[in-house]
Amino acid sequence: MEVDVYKASKRPTPQETLYVFVLHGEIPEEKLPPEEIRELGFLERVKTIDLESGQKRIGLNTEEALQSLNEKGYYVQSTHFVIRFTPTASSQSIHESVNRR
């Protein structure tokens, strides 16, 4: 099943991004309820993917997405990104040399 993926301009938190999936060629604003459109803001199409049952995709429950697409005509995916800094040996030595001055 060919699906268009749209990125929402509004974010619930700085680490969270929302994506809307609709069948290829469909207009998301015609599928989503008005209150959902207000919460998502402007939708920018980012890509078209081929979504099939049993596929493994990072951060996406494929079966849930396909079921929602078949029942509602759209699927909203929330992705959370957390960036953690882990000091390396070289960054540790830089930190130590700066603190010695």
Image (tube, helix red, strand yellow):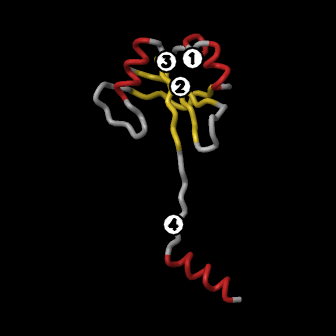
Q: Earlier in the sequence, mark 1 or mark 3?
A: 1
Give the residue drawn at x 61%, y 29%.
8
- Report x, y in % for residue 99: 67, 84
| Structural distance between the alpha carbons of marks 3 and 4 | 38 Å
- Report x, y in % for residue 96: 61, 83
Give the residue drawn at x 41%, y 21%.
2
Amino acid at the residue labelled 2: Val
| Structural distance between the alpha carbons of marks 4 and 2 | 33 Å
Amino acid at the residue labelled 1: Pro
Residue placed under numbered mark 4 in the picture? 86
Within 10 Å of disc 2 (Cα), the crowding (few <14, some 14-19, many 20+) is many
For residue 42, which numbered disc appears in the image?
none
Within 10 Å of disc 4 (Cα), the crowding (few <14, some 14-19, many 20+) is few
Residue depth check, mark 3 versus mark 4: number of the one nearer the observer:
4
- Report x, y in % for residue 86: 51, 66
| Structural distance between the alpha carbons of marks 1 and 3 | 7 Å
Q: Earlier in the sequence, mark 2 or mark 3?
A: 2
Instruction: Look at the picture and state if 57 lies above or below 63.
Output: below
Within 10 Å of disc 3 (Cα), the crowding (few <14, some 14-19, many 20+) is many
- Report x, y in % for residue 81: 53, 46
Q: Nearer the viewer, residue 22 or 87?
A: 87
| Structural distance between the alpha carbons of marks 2 and 3 | 7 Å
Instruction: Identify the secondary structure beneath mark 2.
Output: strand
Image quadrant in which you'd find residue 42: top right
Amino acid at the residue labelled 3: Tyr
Residue placed under numbered mark 3 in the picture? 74
Give the residue drawn at x 52%, y 14%.
26
For residue 28, which numbered disc appears in the image?
1
Q: Are marks 1 and 2 in contact (CB under 8 Å)?
A: yes
Residue placed under numbered mark 2 in the picture? 20
Q: Earlier in the sequence, mark 4 or mark 1?
A: 1
